Image (cartoon, rainbow, N blue to C red):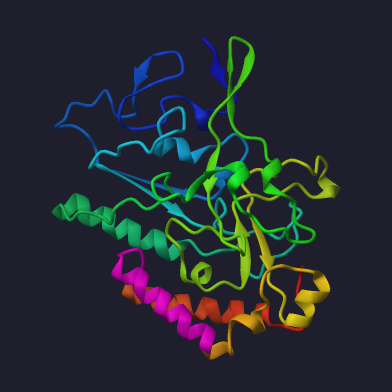
Amino acid sequence: PGYNTFSATQYPFTDLAQTGPRGERDGILAAYRPNQVPKVIYTNTSVEYWGLGRSAALTHLTPDGTRDADLPENVRIYHLAGTQHGEAAFPPTPGTGQALGNPMPQGNVMRAILRAAYQWVESGTRPPDSRHATLRDQTLVQLKAIGFPAIPGVGDPRTIEGPGHLDEGHFAALPFLVPKVDADGNEVAGIRVPELVVPLATTTGWNFRAERVGNPTTLYALLGSYVPFARTKAEREARRDPRLSVEERYRDREDYLGRIRTAAASLVKDRFLLQEDIDDVVQRATRHWAYATATTQTN
């Protein structure tokens, strides 16, 4: 039999049994009896959709990538939109990627999910429904349809090589579908934290290798990108950046923070953020505003 080039794309991909590339039928939880199935919550960052040899989309698609897969009631899949595999430090600093590392917050959402998991096991309270991009709502798309803007100095994600496996010594490509993005390049589906709903930057699940570390046309494993907006319209026009500047989006800091609070309240309602963490969200956003509007900024 052939074998996968990356263990992250090893069949079976889904919990329920599906027919695989060689006609075999299997699922991650297929061996469990109905009264033995565990309660499972999967969380994926954007890197899991984009990273080297990864294809998180296959965990909720049919193996040929043409239809959304059915998820069992005992499973939830959550995508933390616009995040990297473990958030980078903030403020971001140059590293091994061409762009700054992605510091989009994840911790508070994970705390809320952990509480939901506990309540599910302890009292049977159903956790929030799965939240991720889907073919059904056209938020999960083929790579060529990603819609990423042409930002000066930022690599084109359409050139990223997708996942595959070796079948009797020959490379066979696997379906490569990724979350759709908006005009800023930010993902539109999944759990979107307030700093993604009310953005000051484009944050991605991919980052091309820096020239100084070699092979700059490929990705650096597990890194995402942080690409800040221009502060002013004049700066944006000078850079020929298609994304609106900070001053074109928000009246002032209070306008920005008010929108952050509104987005945070929405996440609390959906049980993806704890009420006691709202102040932490606002404090972090306040630091982000100071960084994004400073006269000197690391780019």
The residue sitting at 79% across, 59% down in the picture is 153
Query: In the rendered picture of this protein, how many numbered marks are placed on residues?
Result: 0
| Residue sitting nearer the eye, 210 or 133 | 133
Q: Does the magenta stretch include residue 151?
A: no
Residue 88 visible, this orientation: no
Report which quarter residue 95 is drawn in: bottom right
Bounds of the magenta segment: 255-273
Q: Is residue 16 left or right of residue 296?
A: left
Main secondary structure found in the magenta portion: helix
The residue sitting at 39% across, 39% down in the picture is 60
| Residue sitting nearer the eye, 117 or 167 | 167
Q: In this view, does 219 lie to the left or right of 69?
A: right
Reply above or below: 218 against 43.
above
* Image position, residue 180 (x, y; %): 53, 52
* Image position, residue 244 (x, y; %): 66, 74
Q: In this view, does 143 lie to the left or right of 240?
A: left
The residue sitting at 60% across, 34% down in the picture is 53
* Image position, residue 127 (x, y; %): 25, 55
Reply above or below: 5 against 179.
above
* Image position, residue 261 (x, y; %): 42, 80
Q: Does the magenta stretch include residue 271?
A: yes
Q: In this view, does 18 lie to the left or right of 213?
A: left
Reply above or below: 224 against 175.
below
| Residue sitting nearer the eye, 182 or 288 | 182
Report which quarter residue 6 is drawn in: top right
Quadrant of image for the C terminus: bottom right
